């Protein structure tokens, strides 16, 4: 079974050739140092949300734009937050497994919605959520396939710096974006990705600089 994640599907959308090389040949794109601040912020935000989860309330800064309550079962959520034990969707016919790690989840009545934190250095653009559409569609698919019905919605919570106060305390602005999602789109994309992996290596992507980097090694 071929195991994919929302992040590898992101690569598939960017460049099928780089995706094919990564999964089939274990050839990864070259990368520079990964900034540690977003990872550190992610852990801090999770702890902060868990405090409000125990109170049965949403954090006050997101209440006006997020409906429902935080997913109450922290033990289950911690499994979902780990890619090794996270939600998974298996397609035996196609020979693949899609699994992913959620930051958080919101419950409104009988419906569930993924909630994803994003740390940025500047305010998000009006249409910035489009970059994450495939990821949120995949989360919706994972929830639905594990018997957690959705209302075809997900939330992006953006944190970006506002100012530095006395004693080095940094305050952040928070913006929430409600995003309409479609799990069927994620399922179709997952199937297309598996088909590409079982086919000959795709041609070089005309707009991918990494394809030019690898040219000559895999011709």
Image (cartoon, rainbow, N blue to C red):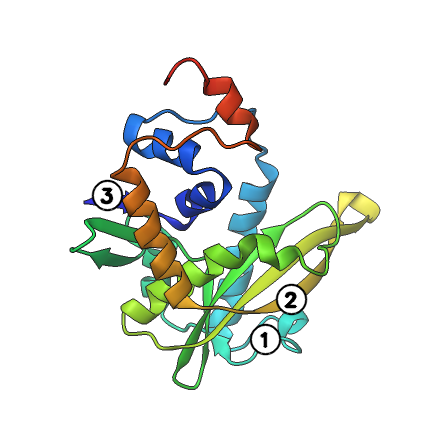
x, y percent for residue 123: 75, 54
> Which-is-in-front pick, marks 3 and 1?
3
Give residue 66's quadrant in the image: bottom right
Residue 161 appears in the figure: yes
- Which residue is most to the bottom? 109
Q: Earlier in the sequence, mark 2 or mark 1?
A: 1
Disc 3 vs disc 2: which is toward the camera? Answer: 3
Crowd band around label 3 with a 10 angstrom C-alpha radius: few (<14), some (14–19), many (20+): some
Q: Is residue 217 toward the left or the right of residue 181 in the image?
A: left
Classify the position of the N terminus by image quarter: top left
Sequence-first disc among 3 and 2: 3
Residue 66 marker: 1
- How many discs appear? 3
- Percent position (x, y) of residue 12? 43, 42
Marking on residue 2: 3
Alpha carbon separation for disc pair 2 and 1? 8 Å
Answer with left or right where residue 103 lies relative to residue 190: right
- Real-space CA distance between mark 3 and mark 2, rounded to the nearest whole angstrom: 34 Å
For image coordinates 55% across by 51% down, the residue present is: 44
Query: N-terminal of the two: label 3 or label 1?
Result: 3
Image position of 80 with respect to 166: above or below: below
Q: Nearer the viewer, residue 74 or 176?
A: 176
Say the numbered circle drawn on residue 124.
none
* Depicted 217 relative to depicted 69: above or below: above
Can you say which quadrant of the picture contains the C terminus? top left
User: SS class of the residue under badge 2?
Assistant: strand
What whole-number distance in Å separates the C-alpha atoms at marks 3 and 1? Answer: 35 Å
Give the labeled residue for mark 2.
176
Judging from the image, what secondary structure is the residue with disc 3 in? strand
Residue 117 in percent (x, y) is at 56, 56
Disc 1 on helix, strand or loop? Answer: loop
Mark 2 burial class by Cα count in 10 Å: few <14, some 14-19, many 20+ = many
């Amino acid at each position: 079974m071929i195991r994919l994640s929302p992040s590898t599907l992101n690569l598939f959308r960017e460049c099928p050739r780089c995706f094919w090389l990564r999964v089939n040949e274990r050839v990864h794109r070259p990368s520079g140092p990964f900034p540690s601040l977003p990872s550190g912020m992610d852990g801090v935000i999770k702890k902060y949300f868990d405090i409000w989860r125990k109170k049965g309330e949403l954090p006050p800064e997101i209440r006006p734009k997020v409906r429902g309550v935080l997913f109450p079962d922290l033990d289950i959520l911690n499994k979902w937050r780990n890619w090794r034990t996270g939600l998974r969707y298996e397609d035996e016919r196609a020979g693949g497994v899609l699994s992913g790690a959620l930051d958080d989840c919101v419950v409104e009545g009988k419906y569930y919605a993924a909630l994803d934190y994003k740390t940025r250095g500047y305010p998000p653009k009006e249409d910035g959520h489009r970059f994450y559409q495939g990821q949120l569609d995949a989360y919706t698919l994972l929830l639905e396939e594990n018997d957690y019905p959705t209302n075809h919605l997900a939330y992006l919570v953006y944190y970006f710096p506002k100012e530095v106060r006395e004693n080095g305390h940094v305050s952040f602005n928070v913006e929430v974006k409600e995003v309409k999602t479609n799990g069927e789109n994620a399922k179709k994309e997952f199937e297309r990705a598996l088909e590409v992996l079982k086919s000959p290596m795709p041609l070089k992507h005309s707009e991918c600089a990494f394809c030019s980097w690898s040219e000559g090694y895999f011709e």
